[in-house]
DNA sequence: AGTTTGACGCTGCGGCATGG
DNA sequence: CCATGCCGCAGCGTCAAACT
């Protein structure tokens, strides 16, 4: 497995190369965007790792999405400040790893992203804890209860379940659900999140603040200014 | 069989309330 | 003040029943 990196800072370059080699990946290091894009035209790289390098990362992500499409997972490595995370995810990064967390979380995130891409054709069902999403019936089952979802609701649920416990940016959700970005109103996405919340937890409003639930419903948590995260 | 009509559901947006 | 949650509404598409 090869991971192309774009790390202008020596410390980031050293960290990523060491982490990747330690996990059995072969790093393909770059310090400038254009050689990286040229390298990506050739088959070989399984993922891209970008340094969160100030505002430059925004341009890199746009350019990479343009040239590499959605085929290659892109993970951004940075200091983990909210501005950086927000910037990276909104610009189309698949995930964000924090330098201070060490090599292990970075490798886990990369591996998960590579695996989800490698799956290629979507599976027909997706499990997350006690819940299953079924593409054939466009429904969510909890064992006893089965909830049918509309097309948009299902796409939204699928994207969130695929990224269980991780923040999914509104940008990513728009791309995954509508297949395009930018021209989908933010309010529209919020409306679908609201509808999905109602279906995931129909008693939620009544039960709010009470502790009697037998099976906790999945919760779609808003991450202020970034996106949403599904938690069980 | 083909067309029209009405009911229904889905999608997207506007407006208001709320909370950080 | 701004982002978000929530509710309501209009436009549109789909589908089945009624009609020609």
Image (cartoon, coloured by chain):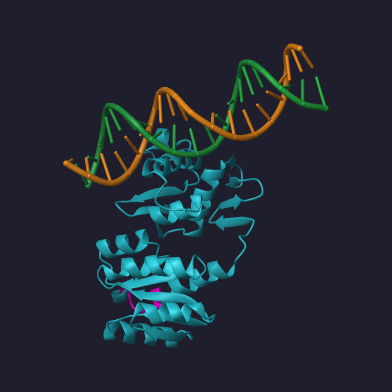
Chain colours: A cyan, B green, C orange
Establish if A105 lies above or below A17: above
The front one of A221 and A48 is: A48
The front one of A163 and A130 is: A163
In the picture, residue A79 is in which quadrant? bottom left
The front one of A200 and A10 is: A10
- Looking at the image, which residue is at 58% across and 41% down? A147
- Looking at the image, which residue is at 40% across and 55% down? A171
Q: Which residues are magenta?
A: A101-106
Residue A152 is a magenta residue: no
Report whether residue A96 is seen: no
- Main SS, magenta region, reads helix
Left or right of A171, for residue A82: left
Q: Position of residue A204 (x, y in %)?
A: 43, 38
Q: Position of residue C3 (x, y in %)?
A: 28, 46
Left or right of A191, for residue B17: left
Establish if A172 lies above or below A44: above
Q: Position of residue B20 (x, y in %)?
A: 22, 47
The front one of A150 and A217 is: A150
Task: Count up the numbered dots.
Answer: 0
- Looking at the image, which residue is at 33% across and 55% down? A226
Establish if A108 lies above or below A211: below
Report whether residue A138 is seen: yes
- Looking at the image, which residue is at 63% across and 51% down? A135
Left or right of A13, for residue A65: right
Q: Position of residue B8 (x, y in %)?
A: 59, 25
């Amino acid at each position: 497995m090869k991971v192309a990196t774009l790390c202008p800072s020596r410390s980031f370059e050293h960290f990523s190369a060491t982490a990747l080699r330690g996990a059995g990946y072969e790093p393909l290091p770059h310090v400038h965007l254009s050689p990286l894009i040229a390298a990506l035209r050739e088959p070989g790289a399984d993922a891209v790792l970008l340094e969160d390098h100030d505002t430059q990362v925004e341009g890199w992500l746009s350019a990479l999405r343009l040239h590499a499409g959605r085929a290659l997972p892109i993970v951004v490595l940075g200091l983990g400040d909210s501005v950086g995370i927000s910037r990276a995810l909104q610009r189309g990064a698949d995930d964000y790893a924090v330098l201070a967390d060490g090599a292990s979380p970075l490798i886990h995130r990369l591996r998960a992203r590579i695996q989800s891409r490698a799956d290629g054709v979507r599976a027909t069902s997706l499990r997350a804890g006690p819940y299953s999403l079924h593409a054939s019936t466009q429904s969510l089952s909890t064992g006893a209860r089965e909830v049918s979802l509309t097309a948009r609701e299902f796409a939204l649920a699928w994207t969130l379940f695929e990224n269980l416990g991780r923040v999914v940016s509104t940008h990513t959700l728009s791309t995954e659900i509508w297949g395009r970005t930018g021209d989908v109103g933010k309010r529209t996405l919020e409306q679908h999140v609201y509808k999905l919340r109602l279906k995931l937890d129909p008693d939620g409003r009544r039960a709010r603040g009470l502790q009697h639930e037998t099976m906790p419903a999945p919760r779609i948590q808003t991450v202020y200014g970034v996106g949403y995260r599904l938690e069980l």
